[in-house]
Amino acid sequence: MSLLLAVAGCTTEPKPADSRAELPTGAPTSAGESARSNESAAPQAGAGARTMLQKAEEYMQMRRFDLAITTLERALRMEPRNAWIWNRLAMAHLEARNRQQAVHLATKSNALVGEDHPLRPLNNNIIARARKK
């Protein structure tokens, strides 16, 4: 018990009850490409998942899709109902040429958002690209 109190006292600032934070606007729709039509639609994620999303985007830019996929899968374990993470994982699979998996993941992301959500066109683009190739 005293160890828990000692560890709890190590934090420098209190965390709010809901520590959800925005990622930078305009999540890329492919490695190095911005979502120009959805620049105001910023992904929402808790601090841990947000860090993983950012790292995964770095891996995507380096074309290390295997590392991006692994990182995004870890983020999904933290936030399994986060449609943005499902979207980014779908894009990583599309870029890695796992087209069937990309369709499945983008469809899952769509299932988590409403009809007018700004993420839906990004998911539909992934699905169309995966089916076209």
Image (cartoon, grey):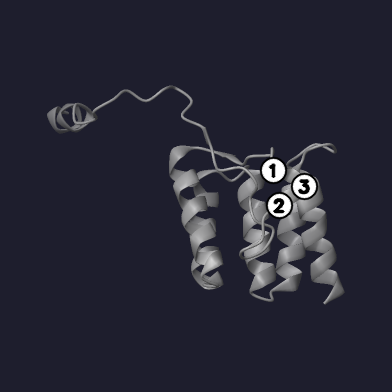
Q: Which residue lies under the disc numbered 1?
A: 39
The residue labelled by disc 3 is 37
Whole-percent x, y for residue 40 in the image: 69, 37
Q: Which of these two is toward me, 12 or 36? A: 36
Helix, strand, or loop for circle 2?
loop
Q: Which three-letter amino acid code belongs to the residue tagged 3?
A: Ser
How many angstroms separate mark 3 from mark 2 (CA)? Answer: 6 Å
For residue 104, above or below residue 120: below
- Label 3: which secondary element: helix
How packed mark 2 is, by other alpha carbons closer than 10 Å (few <14, some 14-19, many 20 or more), is some
From this view, report whether residue 40 is shown above or below residue 101. Answer: above
Q: Point out residue 41 in the picture as x, y percentages from the top left corner.
A: 69, 39
Amino acid tagged 2: Ala
Contact? badges 3 and 1 (CB < 8 Å): yes
**Marks 3 and 2 in Cβ contact (< 8 Å):** yes
User: In the image, which disc is placed on residue 125?
Assistant: none
Q: Quadrant of the N terminus?
A: top left
The residues bearing labels 1 and 2 have C-alpha atoms spaced at a distance of: 6 Å
Q: Which residue is mark 2?
A: 35
Rendered residue at 81%/49% (across/down): 121
